[in-house]
Amino acid sequence: MTRVFSGVKPTGHLTLGNYLGAIRRWVDVDQRQSDALFCVVDLHALTVDHDPARVRRLTRQAATLLLAAGLDPELCTVFVQSHVDEHARLSYVMECVATDGEMRRMVQYKEKAARERERGGSVRLSLLTYPVLMAADILAYGTDEVPVGDDQTQHVELTRDLAVRFNQRYGHTFVVPRATRPGVAARVMNLQEPTSKMGKSDDSGPGIVYLLDEPDAVRKKVMRAVTDSAAEVVYDPQERPGVANLLEILAACGGGDPEDLSRGYQSYGALKKDTAEAVVELLRPVQERHKALCAEPAYVERVLRDGAEKARGMAKPMVDSAYRAIGLLPA
Ligand code: TYM
């Protein structure tokens, strides 16, 4: 059976981008067709300036939202990264396979490091080595497929390179994974800046739809989305990114093709209205289940505890064999 692994980082409240780009597929496809693990990758949240209490809160909230979105612990394994030591254990070994130059070429590192320096802050070493930890997350489970949005494909490519290099140098140990992406909405854009990704760690609230936004907040954000001064509704991601983003969101919510949908609209107002309602209806059941699960914190904790135990059992033999292959004496 295909092994699937993916994760979400608790650096902010989960967004519509996380849902359409990744989580919805985990729920609808991956957990049903594969042997799948989904992880709240809290160690990754420590790579930028962070508040410990907030990371704890967001970790719990992300796990609760994954279950609210429909991940079913009977079908897949849901857990928190720091509960399974194997991730950090393997990460060090992969640091001995990766190169400094490779890390510095990662687009996300370059962008985030530049932003951090602009703010006058310092760049944590873990921000540079982050993709190695992500590779360890994936490789520890013998993962075949990694369902992610577009922004993570470079990291999955790096993971493939590291797996191949390790296998060539030290003998076949790792499965070489591949990224899978959704058909539409693989990169949901910020509604206020449609040339930038809708990212949960960004500060610009008005352009980001959060999964827990009230319906009226969703409507307001979508109705105020930046478009352009042209009159007719055309799907052209290069020239008309704002309108293309709305069409992609609408298509992702209801099924269908953004270009086909564009032909049904004469005005931006009507497109925005339908998109807003589609998002509100998409989020409604997730928000209702989230509310119910918040009343059952012991259930969520139990799911995470059981998930970590299962994950540990899967990762340990793989990480042990990587340790042996690279030359470490068995304990
Ligand atoms: P993160 O937490 O930024 O995002 C979680 C998932 O959501 C997708 N995504 C988007 N998709 C479409 N449009 C957007 N605007 C958008 N924003 C986010 C991401 O592509 C991702 O699939 N490094 C990862 C977390 C991670 C991971 C892993 C993922 C750590 N280890 C191992 C897979 C496998 C991250 O920061 O995702």
Image (cartoon, rainbow, N blue to C red):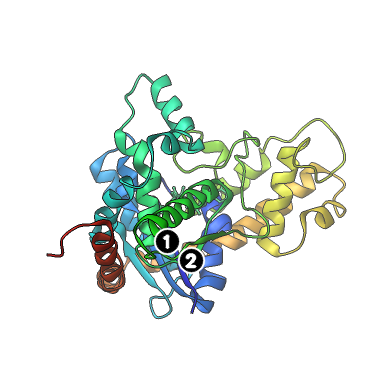
Point 37% across, 43% down: residue: 130
Which of 5 and 39 lies nearest the eye of the viewer?
5
For marks 1 and 2, give the CA distance: 6 Å
Point 70% across, 52% down: residue: 248
Q: Which disc number belongs to residue 217?
A: none
Disc 1 marks a residue whose amino acid type is Leu
- Report the residue marked by disc 1: 65
Secondary element at image label 2? helix
Quarter occupied by the C terminus = bottom left
Quadrant of res 281: bottom right
Which of 168 and 136 lies nearest the eye of the viewer?
168
Labelled pair 1, 2 in contact (Cβ < 8 Å): yes
- Report the residue marked by disc 2: 69
User: x, y percentage for residue 88?
Assistant: 26, 53
Secondary element at image label 1? helix
User: x, y percentage for residue 50?
Assistant: 29, 37
User: x, y percentage for residue 191?
Assistant: 63, 39
- Pointer 2 residue Cβ closer than 8 Å to ligand 1: no
